[in-house]
Image (tube, rainbow, N blue to C red):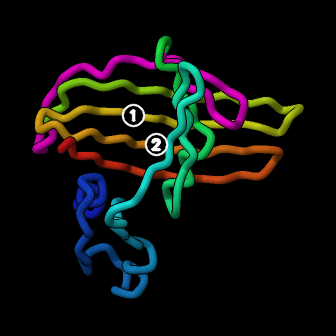
Amino acid sequence: MRGVLGQLAQGEVPQYDPRLGLSREEFQRYTLYQPSLVGVGRATLKLRRAGQRVIFEGGAGSLGVLQGLSIDLLTGELQVPEGFATRPTALLPQRLSNSAVNIRSGFVWSLQGNNVSAGNAIRGQLVLMELSNGQVLLSYRKTSMIRRTITKGEVVVGYQRP
């Protein structure tokens, strides 16, 4: 069992082991595994600028998760459609172990809040990273509620400077 859990924790597809006491069909039912990143090819991320704020207008498919986010270019404050705001924390340069990712710089915005009377809530994290190869990655994961309607979403967008 520890071997299977270790494989899952490392992002690997777990291998069936008869010593678990499960049939192969039961094992597959309990360990549904899908890659966490699905390439969508080239997509257009729509942004607009309003004064000192950059506003994400989302886009097709999974880019719609970013709809309504806005970042103040002077203070770094992130505002979300659920009615909450947060300030960024610097992401220190580092090389991730067992990875080819070298982070040159970046910022992390962590969101958590709720407003019971309005029926709005959010738990999410936006990460903006510049890698040593010049690529910029934007990652956003959220679970939110607007007017008591729950949505979940996750997107990772990469941009390579010309």
Reading the image, the residue beneath label 2 is 140
Residue 83 in magenta? yes
Depth check: give the residue in front, 125 or 57.
57
> Distance from label 1 to label 2 (Cα)?
6 Å
The residue depicted at 45 percent of the width and 50 percent of the height is: 45
Which kind of residue does numbered mark 1 sit on? Val
Q: Is residue 154 above or below residue 24?
A: above
Q: Which residues are magenta?
A: 76-101
**Rendering quarter of residue 144:** top right
Q: Position of residue 119 (x, y in %)?
A: 83, 39
* Left or right position of 82 against 129: right
Q: Residue at x 77, y 37 (%)?
A: 120
In screen coordinates, is 16 left or right of 102? Answer: right
Residue labelled with disc 1: 127
At x 34%, y 60%, the residue is 37
Residue 100, label in figure: none
Please state the horizontal and vertical placement of residue 123, each as a whole percent of the image.
Answer: 59, 36
Quarter of the picture containing the C terminus is top left
Q: Is residue 136 left or right of residue 99?
A: right
Q: Residue 100: horizontal and vertical position, in percent?
A: 10, 44
Q: Residue at x 24, y 53 (%)?
A: 10
Answer yes or no: is residue 97 visible. yes
The answer to if 134 sits in the magenta stretch is: no
